Image (spheres, rainbow, N blue to C red):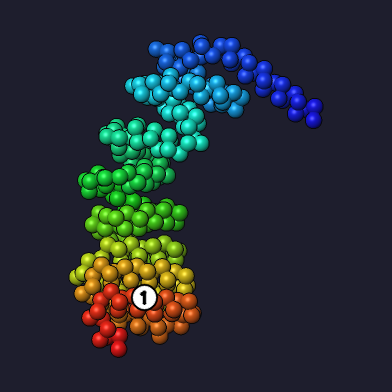
């Protein structure tokens, strides 16, 4: 108990000391010297634990530092602004929108990081680019190209990360991922079933009407090698393919009905039946085959 009292007393002394020199610290945040400004801003990270109310009064000065052209000062100021506003989600969202809107330097930095020596930095840069909104196909291409290379990595973790991210990209930009199809087909035989399943589902997302039959030929032998859990994931992609290309309902329904003869469990077969019923409801012409 005495130790706790001692800590509280020490904390109060620190807060009182900061308050007595607050005016000078606030001025230092916008000092012309980047070293001085960064020193105060980084010190403020620690002071947030001691006297958060005092640091929150510096918001105007911190915003000014964050809006400046000195990169390291801006970096430290943004971090402090987040700490000040972290309990206010709306304020954090507005801050992100303010500092990322129409900022080509942000994309240029991420794009340059795609050529970093570290594979993990390269992957994280690609993932960050893909998460940006309103990207053109040209801006997306370098990140997809890097992920395509990572698909051939000898490290299972990197292969999984790459194909998982490509799978997400294929949901919104299937045309951008079609260049990776040959590498994805190679991953169908990957000993890691999670990687193989993601490769199959990504191929199904990027498939076009003319190659549905060829895709299903890849899927057929694969289905007998995976657990019911993974089969359901693949099934969902096949169902989405039927919605995307309704003219291929005959091929897809025949494939799905064949899955009912599989030695899989009840949960999977129930999912197959639900998928068939859904396709019949969406495509009236499919009723004749279902009978």
- For image coordinates 54% across by 14% down, the residue present is 22
Residue 132 visible somewhere in the drawing: yes
Percent across and percent down for residue 43 are 54, 21
Residue depicted at x 28% and y 69%? 243
Residue at figure coordinates x 34%, y 51% from the top left: 147
Question: Dot 1: what SS?
Answer: helix
- Please say if 218 is above or below 33: below
Q: Which residue is mark 1?
A: 275
> What crowding class fits label 1: few (fewer than 14 Cα within 10 Å), some (14-19), or many (20 or more)?
many
Q: Nearer the viewer, residue 265 or 244?
A: 244
Count of numbered badges drawn on the protein: 1
The N terminus lies in quadrant: top right
Q: Position of residue 57 (x, y in %)?
A: 50, 21
Residue 105 in which image quadrant: top left
Where in the figure is residue 268, as x and y percent of width and height? 45, 76
Front residue of 7/205: it is 7
Name the residue at 36% across, 24% down: 67
Horizontal relation, residue 229 to residue 146: left or right: right
Between 24 and 171, the residue placed more toward the observer is: 24
């Amino acid at each position: 108990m005495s130790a706790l009292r001692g800590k509280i007393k020490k904390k109060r002394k620190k807060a009182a000391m900061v308050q007595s020199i607050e005016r000078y610290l606030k001025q230092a945040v916008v000092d012309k010297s980047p070293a001085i400004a960064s020193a105060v801003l980084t010190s403020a990270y620690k002071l947030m634990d001691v006297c958060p109310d005092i640091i929150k009064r510096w918001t105007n000065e911190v915003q000014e530092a964050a809006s400046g052209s000195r990169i390291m000062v801006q970096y430290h100021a943004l971090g402090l602004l987040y700490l000040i506003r972290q309990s206010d989600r709306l304020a954090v969202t507005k801050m992100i929108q303010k500092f990322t809107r129409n900022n080509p330097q942000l994309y240029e930095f991420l794009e340059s990081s795609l050529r970093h020596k570290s594979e993990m930095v390269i992957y994280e840069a690609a993932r960050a680019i893909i998460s940006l909104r309103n990207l053109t196909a040209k801006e997306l291409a370098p990140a997809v190209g890097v992920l395509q290379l990572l698909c051939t990595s000898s490290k299972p973790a990197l292969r999984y990360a790459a194909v998982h991210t490509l799978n997400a990209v294929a949901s919104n930009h299937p045309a951008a991922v079609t260049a990776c199809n040959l590498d994805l087909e190679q991953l169908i035989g990957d000993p890691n079933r999670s990687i193989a399943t993601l490769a199959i589902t990504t191929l199904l997302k990027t498939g076009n009407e003319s190659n549905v039959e060829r895709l299903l030929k890849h899927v057929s032998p694969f289905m007998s090698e995976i657990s019911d859990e993974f089969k359901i994931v693949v099934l969902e992609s096949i169902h989405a393919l039927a919605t995307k290309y309704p003219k291929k309902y005959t091929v897809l329904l025949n494939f799905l009905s064949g899955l009912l003869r599989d030695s899989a469990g009840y949960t999977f077969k129930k999912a197959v039946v639900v998928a068939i019923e859904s396709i019949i409801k969406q495509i009236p012409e499919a009723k004749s085959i279902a009978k």
